[in-house]
Every structure is written in structure tokens, then in C-alpha cells.
């Protein structure tokens, strides 16, 4: 069980001219499955390849070609489902969703409308202020991606790139449990984090490997609670769906502006039409793409080229047993084992690689000190050089060595920063560097006392002032530190200064 307790976040309220309104949001996230080959063909999924170079006869829908399911993509979908604590359906099936588009050579997309591979699951969405919401997952289905039409390369022609055609996508459909723009972004962030931990989607939103259709409706306070009690959608407002969002910032802006549009309509006595809309970031507005009346009739039917997909419980159990520790569990363990704050544990577990790094630094050492050093010094320094944690010039063993020197009071915190910079730039064993370069902290009170006596003797006026105003003691501490090249143990210096000035 998770050892984290959170309060329920409040829904976002938008004040209209007449009423306060609440938001209701449900997301359909399309996540590209991490796999070298496509869902039904052996063609490569490599990003950035020469246009139309990763296209097999199946992807190009040549006559007589038959799809063959890629077992690894199925495994990835199952792994994702298990990671979201969802039901796995041992029998699922593929349907054809028929529509015409130049970048869809088959004339249909193979998807799973009626029998998805994954059923109900859940995602804990933490908002960073001590509140969190459990967002229910309705289903995850596997489907093919379409190709890309390019309209801006030639004034007279459009081009089609089929490299993406047939790449496996997981469509992860949430219940309408999200109650504000920040929550929507936090949900996508959490989902992305879990998928990256699982290794089932790289979550690269810029490359379009994760994109979301955002469903938004508004309701009066109290209506959502009625929906929750009854699961009856008629308590909710009519939703509009904003298609294909691939930026956290735009998701938030689009939700807010779409909610305000709906509020204005309803308060003016109108009705919201259920429709698909597009967000225009330049104008910060959503525009109608198609209304429900013009919605496609996809004429879904089971794909006759593909048998229903049957998987065995034993295989699902094997995948379950191979799951890595997931973010919630890792975070809660970090809080318990290393006495970290909720915030620090969140930062350190945001990426599996950072968590792993931290853990090898913290193991057997002072966890809090390790967290401070990883978050404040290491992350900051890596960012400055635009480096990834996996490319850190300072290894966990080296940082661990620095931390041991601090814990043993061999070096002061200040010297430790210099030492870190040396290790970062030149490498080497921290303990050896400290030895060779004489960076050891002076805890020998005799040496500190000698330095302090000299300073007192040289500055009688300053001594008189400090005797009446104890705040000036800091000046002496600073002078001793300077005289000892920053190597004096600050605790010892403070004590001695206080003693001497009291005499
Ligand atoms: P479709 O394929 O027609 O978009 P789906 O059932 O696949 O329908 O997805 C509907 C999405 O809309 C789900 O994420 C669901 O949670 C969300 N949704 C349903 N009703 C509402 C509502 N009233 N307000 C906001 N979101 C909603
Ligand atoms: Mg939809």
C-alpha cells in the first residue's frame, strides 16, 4: 500500500456573468508504443527517416497484403495496462474504422472499438500542493497511426509521407474525472512518467509521440457529484473535444478558453453543440472542425483479416512480474527510507534515471544530504552544461564520496562545493583530491584559536563594538574563514568567537 496521504483538490471555478461554473474534463491520450517495428508489419518506426523509406507493402496497402500482429506491441499494451493497475482483457479484437484520407492508404484504420485489450485502471494525479486526485482510466486500445500529409512544401502540390502509417498507438481514455486545466496537465505529466518508467512510450510530445484529445464541458456546482453518485452522464454538460494537443501549455490554455466560450453560450441562453474543435495558439481560441451532425460514420466492423486476439493469463503474469518499481511506490519508499520531503521525493522520482542515480548515492549514506546534493548541486550543474543525468561527469560513487567527506566533517559544505566542481571538471577520487590539495577542514581548535587571536589583536576597535553588539561576531567568523582558506570548521569557529568575545 502507498504511504502517501492527500486531500482531494478543489475543482477549478470560473465565474461567469451569472453563475459560478465548474469544469469537467476527460482525455484521450494517444501514446506511440515503443517498438522497433509497426503494429502489423515489420517496417521500422525510426523517427526522422527519409520520407517513405519505412513503408512495407502492408503499410502501403498493396492488394493482397495481410496484417500480422506484432507480439511485442501487444506486450507493451499489456505492460501499460498493468502499470495503470488496469484489467487486462484476455480476449480483444480489432475493428476497421473506415474513412478516406490521402495519408491512409488502406482507407481504414485498424483499431479496437468493441473489445479493447485493456479495461478499467487508475492514475494518481498529484498537484504538488498536498492534494491529489484519482483519475479513472476507462480503457486502452491498440490502433494504427496514419501517415502525414504535407501541404506547405509546394504551392501546387501536397505530399504524403507514409513512414508513420501503421505505427502502433495506445489510445488511453480517461473518465471525465479531471476538474481543471492544471489537473489536466498534471494528469498528462503523470501518465507520461509512468509510461516512461515502463518503457512503453518515450513520451516525446514534440515529436508527436504523445498527444491528447481534450474533452471539456461545464456544469453548475453540485452537478458533478450527482454524476459521480449515479455515473449518469446527463448530469454533465455537453462536451466539446479539442483535437491533437501536444503541449502541456496549450492543453491548459485551450481548456480555459474553451470553458469560457461554453459559459458565454449557456449564460446567453444558448446550447453548446457537441463538436470537434481545434485550438489555435496564435489567437488563443478554439474553432469548430466538425459538428456532431457532420461526424463521420466510420462503419466500424471486425477486421476480417485478423483473428480475435487471445492472450494467456500466464503471459500476463510474467509481464506483471517483470514490471519495474513505479513512480508512486518509488516515491513513497524514498520518503520512508531516506526521510525525504514529498517535494524532494517527487523531484527525484520524476525520471527513473534520476531516481536510480539518487538511490546509489543515498544508499548507506545520509539520505537528506544526498537529496540536497543531487537536486541542488548536481541537477543545477548538469543543467548549466545542458547535460542529461545519464551523461553526468560525476558518478554516484564520486558524489557519494563527497557526501561521506561532509558527513565525517572532513570538509566543510563550502569546500565541498569547490570539490564538486573539481570532480565535475577533472574527475578523480574525492578523498584523494582532498588529501592532495590540502582541502581538509581544520577542526583542530588550536589552529583556529591562533588565527582568531591574531585577528582580535589586530582589530581592537572591532572587538569593542562586537562586545556591545553581538551581531558583529559574524565579522570575526568571516575573518577566520578567510585566514584559513575556508577550511576551518564553521561550528568550531562560531563557538570560539562567542567564547573570546564574552571574555
Ligand atoms: P469519442 O470517441 O466519441 O470521443 P470516447 O468515449 O472514446 O468518445 O471518449 C470520450 C471522452 O470524453 C472520454 O475521455 C470521456 O471521459 C470524456 N467525456 C465524456 N463525457 C464528458 C463530459 N460531459 N465532459 C467532459 N468530458 C467528457
Ligand atoms: Mg474522442
Image: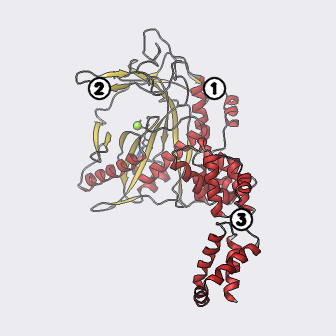
- Above or below residue 145? Residue 398 is below
Q: Are marks 3 and 2 in contact (CB under 8 Å)?
A: no
User: Which sits earlier in the primary sequence, circle 3 or circle 2?
Assistant: 2
Say few, some or many: other residues with alpha carbon within 10 Å of mark 2 (under 14 / 14 to 19 / 20 or more): few
Q: Is residue 159 above or below residue 121?
A: above
The residue sitting at 60% across, 57% down in the picture is: 344
Please give left or right for residue 145 compared with residue 76 in the image.
Answer: left
SS class, disc 2: loop
Q: Is residue 100 visible?
A: no
Q: Is residue 190 above or below residue 3?
A: above
User: x and y percent of residue 418 in the render?
Assistant: 62, 57
N-terminal label among 3 and 1: 1
- Return the x and y of residue 94 as percentages of the image width and height: 50, 24
Residue 332 against residue 73 in the figure, above or below: below
Of label 2 and label 1, which has the lower sequence position? 2
Q: Which mark is residue 153?
A: 2
Mark nearest the camera among 3 and 1 is 3
For numbered disc 1, what is the local secondary structure? loop
Q: Which residue is mark 1?
A: 311
Q: Are marks 2 and 1 in contact (CB under 8 Å)?
A: no
Mark 2 vs mark 1, CA separation in Å: 45 Å
Residue 63 placement (x, y as % from top left):
43, 9
Disc 3 secondary structure class: loop
Total number of numbered discs in the rendering: 3
The residue shown at (51%, 41%) is: 138
Nearer the camera: disc 2 or disc 1? 2
Q: How is the image coloured?
A: secondary structure
Say which residue label 3 marks: 441
Give the quarter of the image for residue 316.
top right
| Left or right: 199 in relation to 172 | right
Amino acid at each position: 500500500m502507498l504511504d502517501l496521504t492527500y486531500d482531494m483538490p478543489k475543482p477549478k471555478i470560473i465565474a461567469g456573468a451569472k453563475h459560478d461554473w465548474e469544469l469537467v474534463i476527460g482525455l484521450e491520450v494517444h501514446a506511440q508504443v515503443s517498438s522497433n517495428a509497426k503494429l502489423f508489419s515489420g517496417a521500422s518506426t525510426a523517427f526522422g527517416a527519409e520520407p517513405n523509406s519505412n513503408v512495407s507493402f502492408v503499410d502501403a496497402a498493396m492488394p493482397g497484403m495481410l496484417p500480422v500482429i506484432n507480439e511485442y506491441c501487444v506486450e507493451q499494451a499489456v505492460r501499460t495496462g498493468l502499470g495503470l493497475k488496469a484489467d487486462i482483457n484476455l480476449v480483444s479484437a480489432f475493428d476497421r474504422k473506415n474513412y478516406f484520407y490521402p495519408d491512409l492508404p488502406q482507407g481504414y484504420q485498424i483499431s479496437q472499438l468493441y473489445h479493447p485489450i485493456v479495461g478499467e485502471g487508475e492514475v494518481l494525479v498529484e498537484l504538488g500542493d498536498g492534494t491529489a486526485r484519482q483519475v479513472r482510466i476507462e480503457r486502452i486500445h491498440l490502433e494504427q497511426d496514419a501517415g502525414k500529409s504535407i501541404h506547405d512544401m509546394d504551392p501546387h502540390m501536397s505530399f504524403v509521407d507514409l513512414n508513420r502509417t501503421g505505427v502502433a498507438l495506445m489510445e488511453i481514455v480517461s473518465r471525465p474525472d479531471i476538474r481543471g486545466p492544471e489537473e489536466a496537465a498534471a494528469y498528462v505529466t503523470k501518465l507520461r512518467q509512468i509510461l516512461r518508467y515502463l518503457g512503453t512510450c518515450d513520451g516525446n510530445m514534440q515529436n508527436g509521440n504523445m498527444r491528447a484529445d481534450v474533452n471539456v464541458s461545464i456544469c453548475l456546482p453540485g452537478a458533478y457529484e450527482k454524476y459521480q453518485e449515479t455515473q449518469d452522464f446527463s448530469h454533465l454538460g455537453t462536451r466539446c473535444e479539442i483535437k491533437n494537443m501536444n503541449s502541456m501549455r496549450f492543453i491548459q490554455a485551450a481548456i480555459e478558453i474553451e470553458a469560457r466560450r461554453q459559459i458565454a453560450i449557456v449564460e446567453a441562453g444558448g446550447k453548446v453543440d457537441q463538436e470537434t474543435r481545434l485550438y489555435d495558439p496564435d489567437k488563443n481560441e478554439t474553432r469548430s472542425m466538425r459538428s456532431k451532425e457532420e461526424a463521420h460514420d466510420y462503419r466500424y466492423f471486425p477486421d476480417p483479416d485478423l483473428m480475435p486476439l487471445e492472450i494467456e493469463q500466464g503471459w500476463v503474469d510474467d509481464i506483471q512480474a517483470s514490471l519495474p518499481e513505479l513512480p508512486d511506490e518509488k516515491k513513497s519508499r524514498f520518503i520512508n527510507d531516506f526521510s525525504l520531503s514529498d517535494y524532494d521525493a517527487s523531484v527525484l522520482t520524476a525520471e527513473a534515471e534520476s531516481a536510480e542515480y539518487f538511490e546509489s548515492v543515498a544508499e548507506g549514506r545520509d539520505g537528506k544530504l544526498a537529496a540536497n546534493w543531487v537536486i541542488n548541486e548536481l541537477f543545477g550543474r548538469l543543467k548549466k552544461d545542458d547535460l542529461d543525468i545519464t551523461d553526468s561527469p560525476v558518478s554516484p560513487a564520486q558524489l557519494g564520496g563527497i557526501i561521506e567527506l561532509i558527513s565525517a566533517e572532513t570538509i566543510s559544505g563550502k569546500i565541498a562545493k569547490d570539490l564538486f566542481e573539481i570532480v565535475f571538471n577533472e574527475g578523480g577520487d574525492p578523498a584523494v583530491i582532498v588529501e592532495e590539495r590540502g582541502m581538509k577542514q581544520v577542526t583542530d581548535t588550536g589552529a583556529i584559536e591562533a588565527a582568531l587571536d591574531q585577528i582580535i589583536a589586530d582589530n581592537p576597535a572591532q572587538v569593542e563594538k562586537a562586545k556591545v553588539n553581538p551581531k558583529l561576531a559574524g565579522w570575526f567568523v568571516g575573518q577566520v574563514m578567510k585566514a584559513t582558506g575556508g577550511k576551518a570548521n564553521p561550528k568550531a569557529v562560531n563557538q570560539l568567537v562567542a567564547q573570546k568575545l564574552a571574555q
